Image (tube, rainbow, N blue to C red):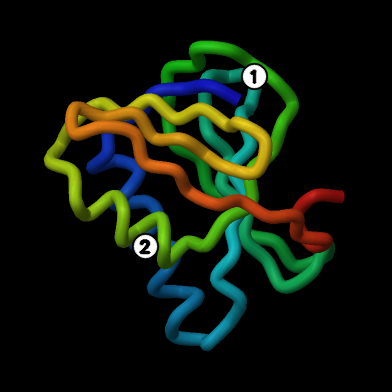
Amino acid sequence: MYFSVLSSFLLRKLHTLYKIININNLSNSITFEISKKNQLKIIWGLDSKNLIYTYIKINVQKYTKEKATLSIKFMINVLTTFSNEELLLKKKKNTLNIYSKQGVYKIPTYYDLNHNK
């Protein structure tokens, strides 16, 4: 998983999804997956039957079928530190690395049974 995206687009999409999650006091884990149409598929749900999908346009640097599950709140907190800049995101083992003008940020990922089936 290796792609680039504008920080403001990703932040806006995650913030909207977070409002839904936060209002209902639900799990804050989300899963990133790259679709074949140069889109980032963001998945959130209570279980494998009740899922919300949303998409954002990205520039795929390397297509893989990997998924990255992470905390939406943590990701939002990291993204708010950037101005509107292009970020490179690359999954390495148990982290999603964000490459920016300020440096590299490592976001911990984890295995989530609800999202990684």
Mark 2 sits on what residue? 16
Given residues 5 and 111, the one toward you in this image is 111
Q: Residue at x 58, y 19 (%)?
A: 37
Given residues 95 and 36, the one toward you in this image is 95
Looking at the rendered structure, the kind of residue marked 2 is: Thr
Judge whether 61 appears above or below 77 on screen: above
Looking at the rendered structure, the kind of residue marked 1 is: Lys
Count of marks placed on residues:
2
Q: Which mark is residue 36?
A: 1
Question: Is residue 53 in view from this perspective?
Answer: no
Question: Is residue 51 in view from this perspective?
Answer: yes
Given residues 50 and 10, the one toward you in this image is 10
Given residues 42 and 71, the one toward you in this image is 71
Q: Which mark is residue 96?
A: none
Q: Secondary structure at mark 2?
A: helix
Q: Residue at x 35, y 43 (%)?
A: 10
Q: Residue at x 52, y 39 (%)?
A: 96
**Image quadrant for the N terminus?**
top right
Q: Write down the quadrant of residue 93 in the picture.
A: top right
Callout 1: 10 Å neighbours few (<14), some, many (20+)?
few
Judge whether 55 appears above or below 20 on screen: above
